[in-house]
Image: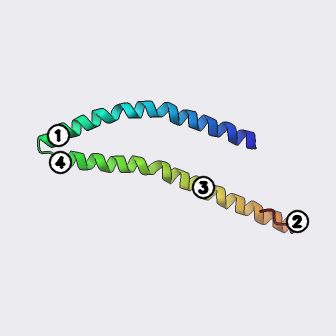
């Protein structure tokens, strides 16, 4: 089980690192577009872009929180089963 978790963690890290290069390349293009629109007096595009950035920033934290919640709930149920079966708590 530990080996599978280790391999999954390494694969996830490699996937994240590989995806960062593409995402970083787009930031300069978005900034240039917003700067040109702000100079023309269109400030609503900048506000929409900021909301989009916050949305994208929050999603990984939300996904992590959901996974952590289900993991905690599963481990708590397993501990309760172990206590009922053996009467021994292994924390």
Q: In this view, does 59 lie to the left or right of 39?
A: right
Q: How far, Cα to Cα, is label 2 from label 4?
A: 65 Å
Q: Which of marks 2 and 3 is nearer the N terminus?
A: 3
SS for callout 1: helix
Tell me the tag on residue 68. 3
CA–CA distance between discs 2 and 1?
A: 68 Å
Tell whether label 1 touches label 3 (CB within 8 Å): no
Q: How crowded is mark 1: few (under 14 residues within 10 Å), some or many (20 or more)?
A: some
* Separation of marks 3 and 1 at Cα, in angstroms: 41 Å
- Rounded to the nearest angstrom, the CA distance separating label 2 from label 3 is 27 Å
In primary-sequence order, the first of circles 2 and 4 is: 4
Q: Which of marks 2 and 1 is nearer the N terminus?
A: 1
Q: Name the residue under label 1.
A: 37
**Residue drawn 26% across the image and 38% down it:** 31
Q: How far apart are marks 4 and 1 (CA)?
A: 7 Å
Q: In which quarter of the image is the N terminus?
A: top right
Q: Is residue 55 above or below residue 72?
A: above
Q: Quick one: label 4 or label 1, which is nearer the N terminus?
A: 1
Q: State the image coordinates of residue 73 (x, y, percent, origin top left).
A: 66, 61
Q: Do the CB atoms of the residues marked 2 and 3 lie less than 8 Å apart? A: no
The location of residue 11, given as percent across then percent down, is: 61, 34
Residue bearing mark 2 = 86
Q: What element carries label 3?
A: helix
77, above or below 9, in the image: below
Q: Position of residue 29 (x, y in %)?
A: 28, 32
Q: How far apart are marks 3 and 4 (CA)?
A: 39 Å
Residue bearing the label numbered 4: 43
Q: Which element carries disc 2, helix, strand or loop? A: helix
């Amino acid at each position: 089980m530990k080996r599978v978790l280790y391999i999954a963690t390494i694969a996830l890290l490699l996937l994240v690192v590989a995806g960062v290069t593409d995402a970083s390349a787009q930031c300069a293009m978005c900034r240039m577009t917003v700067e040109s629109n702000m100079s023309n007096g269109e400030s609503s595009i900048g506000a929409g872009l900021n909301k989009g950035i916050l949305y994208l920033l929050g999603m990984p934290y939300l996904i992590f929180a959901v996974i952590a919640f289900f993991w905690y709930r599963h481990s708590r149920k397993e501990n309760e089963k172990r206590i009922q079966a053996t009467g021994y708590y292994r924390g």
